[in-house]
Image (cartoon, rainbow, N blue to C red):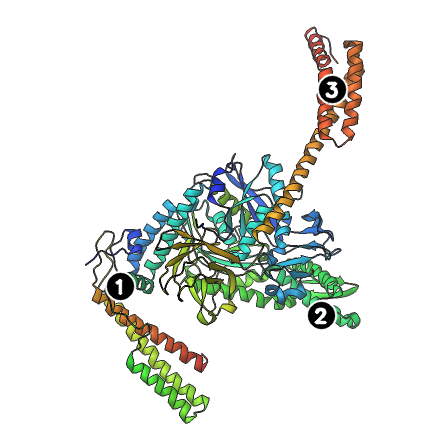
Amino acid sequence: MPIQIDLGNSSGSNAANSVAPKKLGPVIGIDLGTTNSLVAWVNPENLKSTVISGPEGELIPSVIQVNADGKVLNVGTQAFEQKSTDPAHVLYSVKRLMGRSLQDLESQVAQIPYRLKNDELNSQCLIDLGQKTISPIEVSAEVLKKLKKIAEEKIGQKIERAVITVPAYFDDAQRSATKMAGRLAGLEVLRVFNEPTAAALAYGWNSSRPGIVAVYDLGGGTFDLSLLRIDENVFEVLATAGDTQLGGDDFDRALADELLRRFEDRHPDAQLNDVDSNAHRKVYAQMLGAAEKIKKALSDQESLTFDLNGARMQISRTEVEKLWTPLVEETLRLFEAALLDARLNKNDLQDVLLVGGSTRMPLVHKLLEKFFGKAPNAVLNPDQAVALGAALQAHILGGNLSEHLLLDVIPLSLGIETMGGTVSKLIPRNSTIPTEAREVYTNHVENQNSFDIHIVQGERELVKDCRSLARFRLRGLPPAPAGYHRIEVLFRIDVNGILNVRAKDLRSGRAHEIEVKASFGMSEDELIKLLEASIDHAESDFFERQLRDLKIEADSIVIAAEKTLAKSSHLATPSELSSIKARLVDLKNAKSSSDLQALQLAMEEFDAVSRDLAERQVNFALQATLSGQKAE
Amino acid sequence: MEEIDLRPFKTFGLNPFLWIEAEELSVIQKKYLQLSREFHPDRVSQDNDDAQQKAEEISSQINFDYSQLKDFWKLLEVVLSEGLKSANCPVRHPHQAPPEFAIEYFELQEEISDLGLSSEQAKLKFAAFREKVLRKLEEIEGKVKTYAARFPYQGFGKNSVPWTDSDLLFLQDLLENLRYLRSFLRDIESKIGT
């Protein structure tokens, strides 16, 4: 019986889901950023969207530190602090690598401080740690695990579901990679949610002014420009434009390149020509570190004097803004493109909302004001807006009634490869999702028993200039004269912006089997393997936590017991006393071991022999109180 | 006149039309938002996979149909392809060009290759021809719109289609001319490097 197969990005077959236990507990909203990540939720006590803060604060650097074997040593601030001292093993800005192959990143290799290689399918890049490799999906999963833990500890409940944000301009491969990272972190990702839409939701949740707003989202690694119409709780995305390889990091890199030039001028013998060498990577990492600090300082000062590897240098905001202007102008060009797509002009916009840490740069404000004719709206906290919006969506999807309706779009056109390597567009960009397209296929040749479909994403005319999404093969067509078969293939883009494909034989009305070969990312098998490995860890983590908690409990029992023995031993019989003392020794021994069961047993046995004495002690104290005496 | 099942109109409960004014489109927009509120997957329990699937199906249909209704040329394509399916129309060659153009274009090509004109002169000739094609495109697009205006928006309802098979065939003819002219244009533009 032919079965339907999705692209493997949905959460599994229907049968499995209807048997699986229903997931409860709050749904968290996660902003998985290039530089920093945040977790937020809508607190059911006050129904306010709030960022959840852990011991490190609200912003968790999206950074992990591993050793050469791929074992994770640190996640977050502690890892971030090791950035310049251990560049090969401190992994950051990994969001830029999600869903990308080595070829996609070729132009940036000189500026990425760790080694990359391709996986076997040549479809996703891996970070080369020497003896081992680690995928960007695994790195992101570590950050997600940390955020999950922070939320669980603050809320005091187990968290199993989340909404994770992505740049609106993320393509299918990048979205699927994000969803996989969530799964690897033990989260059911209810929605892969666009960042500008999340920010707009945070902005417009309580406001009643209808109008069209632009969300200008310049983060650490990505840029999005979305145009939305907000009207009576409906948030309708009209158009979106962006660049998933343009962000604060590029401003750092431009400055780092300049610093490197100056460094090479002063040290002509440094021999840093080979961009793939360790020497280059190490020096460049230092330049990047310096550039980041200088960039931040220049937001407040006009010029800066600093030390670079022993050399004194000076740089002014004007000089640096010259380097950065082309980057900001690129964002404005994308702004124009979105306006064109939406058939709007600047005057139709009520507001331009700024999102993302990089929008703090004075240059951005200056050029945006010039472009737009008035100052952009900085009412949103640029770091928190996305997470707060994600939490609101999480709240809605968690089953809470709301009047809000979010209508998002796909950012890139979907097409099929046709004769001559050209693309036939199936679903145009900026189509509201979910959406679909249908094509009817037939056998062109007599007795042809299968045919291939190649799906691509992009705006170009030729297949080679677009991004390959997947190749499908329809097999098992029974022999027939040419033109006999009528197989309808349904291409569906779901609310996450991810493609699902189904085939139906129009003659029989039955579903037709369709074999999928994703052009990117991890295969389902690889993901399952990784998941199982992490579940093993999860179990041992859980066990460790139980042991630790029990030991703490045992400690307080021992302290109380020793106090009792010192003060109230006259209340006990001699045999009682000896068994209490014996069980106490056993308890102390069990406490110093790692045997959870032995410790539990020791605690139970101690409790059994000491219970009566404890009761007597209480009664004695009560009597003393009642008779006016002070009890000890 | 047979009742034709035209999905975009059916989904929105509209009487079939080909031509719509901007203010009338806003009425359809309101209906679109109303339908979206009712059937969007976000409005359905996330735990119920069957309901989610159904909501996704219906929502996709609504979104797709709305995109057809909003765009004059897309709507025309849908109406023609559905309408002419059931009609007994003659088998047509997919690329029937307006005859005067096909001949002139090939003559132009021959002229240029025969006389070995320098690429600058050839470019000028092609540019002039391009202008002609653009003007012809405008003219035919105008004809299509004028004819379509015979079947204006008629609000909500269940009327059958107001056009006949010959109306559709006439429009299809014009559209095919347009298609061919546009491919001419692409060809010319690639030659003069626009």
Q: Chain of mark 2?
A: A
Q: Is residue A192 left or right of residue A432?
A: right
Quarter location, residue B111: bottom left
Residue A385 at x, y percent in the picture: 54, 49
Mark 3, Cα crowd under 10 Å, few <14 / some 14-19 / many 20+, is many
Q: Mark 3: which amino acid?
A: Phe
Quadrant into which the C terminus of chain A falls: top right
| Residue visible at 70% across and 6% down in the picture | A627
Q: Mark 2: which amino acid?
A: Arg
Mark 2 sits on what residue? A261
Quarter location, residue A611: top right
Identity of the residue furthest to the bottom in this view: B115
Label 2, label 3: how far apart the Cα atoms are: 72 Å
For the residue pair A74 and A436, the one nearer the viewer reads as A436
Mark 1 sits on what residue? B84
| Residue visible at 45% across and 44% down in the picture | A206
Disc 1 element: helix
Label 2, label 1: how far apart the Cα atoms are: 68 Å
Q: Chain of mark 1?
A: B
Q: Is residue A595 above or below residue A54?
A: above
Q: Mark 1: which amino acid?
A: Leu
Q: Which mark is residue A606?
A: 3
